[in-house]
Amino acid sequence: MATTMQIAPTCRTCGAPLEGGSAECPNCLFQLAVDVGTVERVCAPPFTAPDPERLAALMPDFEFVDLLGRGGMGAVYKVRQTRLNRMAAMKVLPPERAADPEFVERFFREAQALAQLSHPNIVDVYDMGQRGPYLYILMEYVEGKPLRESIRNPPLEPAEALRLTSLLCGALQRAHDLGIIHRDIKPENILVLPDGTVKLLDFGLVKLSQDSRLDRFTLTEINLRVGTPQYMAPEQMSGSLDVDHRVDIYATGVLLYEMLCGAPPAVNYSPPSRKAAVDPRVDRVVERALRESPDERYRRADELRRDIEHIVRTPRRRALVIGTVAAVLIAAALGAYLWHRSATADHAPPPGTPIDGIPIAVVPFDAAGAREHQERWAKHLGVPVEWTNSIGMAFALIPPGEYTRGIPDAEVAEWLAPFTPENTEPSILALVQSSYPAHRVRLTRAFYMAVTETTQGQYERVTGDLKGFFRVDGAGEQRLADPDTQDFPVETLPWFYATVFCEKLSAMEGITNGSAGYRLPTEGEWEFALRGGAATRYWYGNELDREGCFEISAVHTPVRPRRVASLRPNPFGLYDMAGNVSEYCSDWWSPDEFKRYADRCAVNPTGPEDGAQGGYQRVVRGGHFGGLDAQHSNRRSRNDPGLWTNTLGFRTAIDADTVARILRRSQTPPPSTRPSP
């Protein structure tokens, strides 16, 4: 065991602790070797950071504020991008790199690949280029400290170690889904921000896997071992060229062990629970991540995260040994289960049974029927068909109703035909299989659905924050025909940002009971609102309408969303339900959710109680501007709640009873009907 009293020598390049007599740590030696592809470069003097004044002369659109660090791969500066008044970090490479055509080609390919990454726990790449003799990468600047500073002494609390590992796994899964492997996961490459957010840095040793979705990029490195030895998987240490994303999973297992125990695992390591006050189930997680054979490790980073989050959500308690107490608890649990089942599926009345003597909206019905149902329930509840809240968001009343959800039995074979196990990724096949069997859904409460997707302007007004890929200063700015994007749907934000918007909007309206305020719609509510009375494949019929209803920007150049409400609404008065951007629902996703209702009605379904069965992902519904397939009324999708894409946004819902209370409080008598279109 190392003593903490003596001062250890440090690497002259990066400052990391050294073992042995070398002047550089193994990582910097490897990085130097990778830079030029030979070992002779290791003995060269360290890179001298360019003078900021010289760089400023070459790059007048940047103000060089500070030198943040220097290593074998170059120097990193804190800069201000004057045109955008944005702080950023700029990595400047040694000038000899720009003189090597092969390296320049590899550099730009790699930077283009990294620019595809978008995740809250990965530092964004803004730009890359060459000015004079210097290649550079412009990246997001974040204030934080390396994870190394948090785990030296003492080790992290187990709960914090598990939380950080879960966030890291989400970032890695995003990269792996794009075919990008980090290959150098270690504490120095992870920043911890003051609010607890983590940022994964330095994809400088990145390798694009052979089956990458970014297959227009190729990177090959011959006979090079890249990474940091303490965190390298056995196949990396052997110099094998046949490495894949599972080397990152191995390194994550090393990192988790180090955060829990204070040091990386030795060859014959003791389980974490023997060295720290940690749940013994973590031992199995670490052991599986660290298996020598890649085939025996976790297959995906989100599988590792799933097991960690399950441990966090189900803390072990001392076993109860008193028989009577155990019996009482079992009985209570059984009663709770039966109550939940009855609340969501059992005791459903015959189809079409009225509520409070008022007929409900039973699909199918036409546009005139949709309005009739809305007006009837508006009169019964004393609310308007259309309502506008205090910040100008328009909502339409959705009456109680019934419909058939899921792919009809007669169409299952047709749906599955293109998706055979031989030619389909398992996750895609699972999505299709999750959309049947067909079953009856009964919604017993009227609610309001936002007429449009939440816009960038609405999001900024409520949260004070700017979000969106397609906006001025956004990554998609070059695709805009008009700089005014206030009425564009807000996108590129994770699920929990949407829920924060709902919470803040509720507070603005003076709604103190969170459960009664603004929220995301359930999947059952969303599909009923989408259909607007239709039992057809699409809300407007069985044939695809490529212009009138679907936001088919995919046929336009450049590809981007439209302003909300650009095309005609559905019979309930809702716009863009079949397209523009896909939309979050409140439900956890499960591949077996519909199977629960194979032989019974789902009454006000809210999805699984937790996300364990579906990998802790949230339901996503509706088509988007990038494609046609997802606008089918029965098509389901899902998304990691911590990830975002520029094709995914949300719209809000609120219970009609809550709106009635708001109106009574304002003492404003509502109109009984909405204007005719």
Image (cartoon, rainbow, N blue to C red):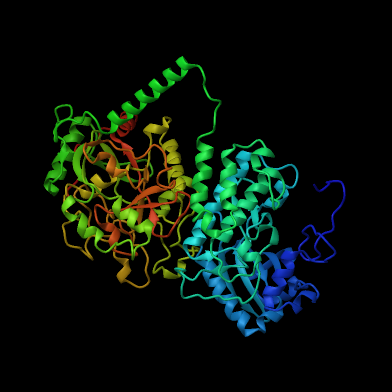
Residue 138 in percent (x, y) is at: 61, 68
Residue 573 in percent (x, y) is at: 23, 49
Residue 474 in percent (x, y) is at: 49, 63
Looking at the image, which residue is at 71% across and 81% down? 96
Q: How many marks?
A: 0
Q: Is residue 97 above or below residue 427?
A: below
Residue ranking furthest to the top: 324
Looking at the image, which residue is at 46% across and 73% down? 215
331 vs 444, nearest the viewer = 331
Residue 192 in view of the camera: no
341 vs 59, nearest the viewer = 341
Residue 212 in view of the camera: yes
218 vs 50, nearest the viewer = 218
Residue 564 in percent (x, y) is at: 32, 56
Q: Is residue 466 left or right of residue 331?
A: right
Which picture quadrant has residue 608?
top left
Q: Is residue 483 above or below residue 503?
A: below
Looking at the image, which residue is at 54% across and 52% down? 169
Which picture quadrant has residue 596?
top left
Q: Is residue 610 left or right of residue 25?
A: left
Q: Is residue 112 left or right of residue 571?
A: right
Residue ranking furthest to the right: 6
Q: Is residue 297 above or below residue 261?
A: below
